Image (cartoon, rainbow, N blue to C red):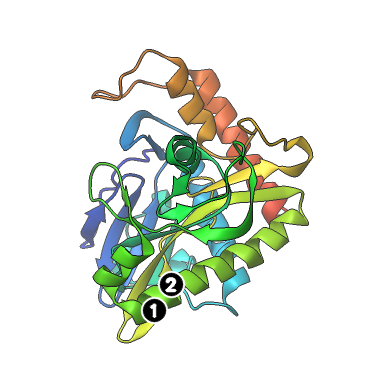
Amino acid sequence: MNSQVLTPIAPAALYKSGKVRDIYESGDALLLVASDRISAYDFVLPSLIPGKGKILNQLSKFWFCFLEGLIENHFITENVEKYPPALKALGDSIQHRSMLVKKTQVLPIECVVRGYLSGSAWVEYSINGTVCGFRLPSGLQESGKLAEPIFTPAIKAESGHDENISFEKMKEILGEKISLFLRDKSIAIFKKAGEFLKNKGILLADTKFEFGQIGDKVILIDEALTPDSSRFWPADQYQEGRAQQSYDKQFVRDYLNSIPWNRIPPPPTLPEEVIRKTLEKYLEIYEIIVGQKVVL
């Protein structure tokens, strides 16, 4: 299946093509189509992960339904038969990898919540003892659990790397009222999802959310709690002081770190073994979370 930018066979406006999603416009709705592309270190890699888009799309639907009592979201339907005719005409290629959503004014902030000290947060802490303006206690170890989840926003970048910012800077961009709402809702979602995952034997190390506005209402958009946007660690293998085994694209990052690539174009092709193991991790975390196999 071609998982690159989809070509409509009837009038359907390609609204935007992102790193891993293609977005079509239809009146007050958008169609999000999750491709099998994978990105790392701000590059879309030339290799595809077959079925990845279907896994992420169906996992996001699960979380949107799970969280709807806590925060409204943009999900309308993933039933292709209920799509507008121009979108249905995209054909079988969008089955199970697409959802119709409400069109919003996207807020330009990545809402990141961290429960453990990992990734870029660990790098920053190990240098100066802070994470995005938070002064943390001394003596913490890599992958160490934080006393409470912390909210570390970032400015969304159309290209290149998102820039971590302080909460004070976020308030300058969005205003205090919306900033407080996003911070509090993001932490509440993180805690609710984290408790659910803990009962499944999974630690939610960190994740990021995006929000949009419809009038004065702020809702959850984009994807939610997928292995592209989160770090999922098996609880029975957790040990602070080191990097963790994970069910997410950290496996791809680890491979890229192991080869002589200086992170300038072109990005390298992934070996078949890395593609296979990445898909296995995505399938496994889906089945752990949802409790059933994904429809591929």
The quarter of the displayed image where residue 12 is located: bottom left
Q: Is residue 199 left or right of residue 148?
A: right
x, y percent for residue 214: 32, 81
Q: Is residue 101 placed above or below 228 in the rendered structure?
A: below
Q: Which residue is mark 2?
A: 182
Mark 1 vs mark 2: in front = 2
Dividing the image into 4 quarters, which one contains the C terminus?
A: top right
In depth, the one of 14 and 166 nearer the eye is 166
The quarter of the displayed image where residue 59 is located: bottom right
Q: How many labels were placed on the picture?
A: 2
In depth, the one of 57 and 237 nearer the eye is 237
The quarter of the displayed image where residue 25 is located: bottom left
User: Could you tell me the amino acid type at mark 1?
Assistant: Val
Is label 1 in contact with label 2 (beta carbons under 8 Å)? Answer: yes
In depth, the one of 101 and 151 nearer the eye is 151
User: Could you tell me the amino acid type at mark 2?
Assistant: Leu
Q: Is residue 24 placed above or below 56 in the rendered structure?
A: below
Dividing the image into 4 quarters, which one contains the N terminus?
A: top left
Q: Which residue is mark 1?
A: 218
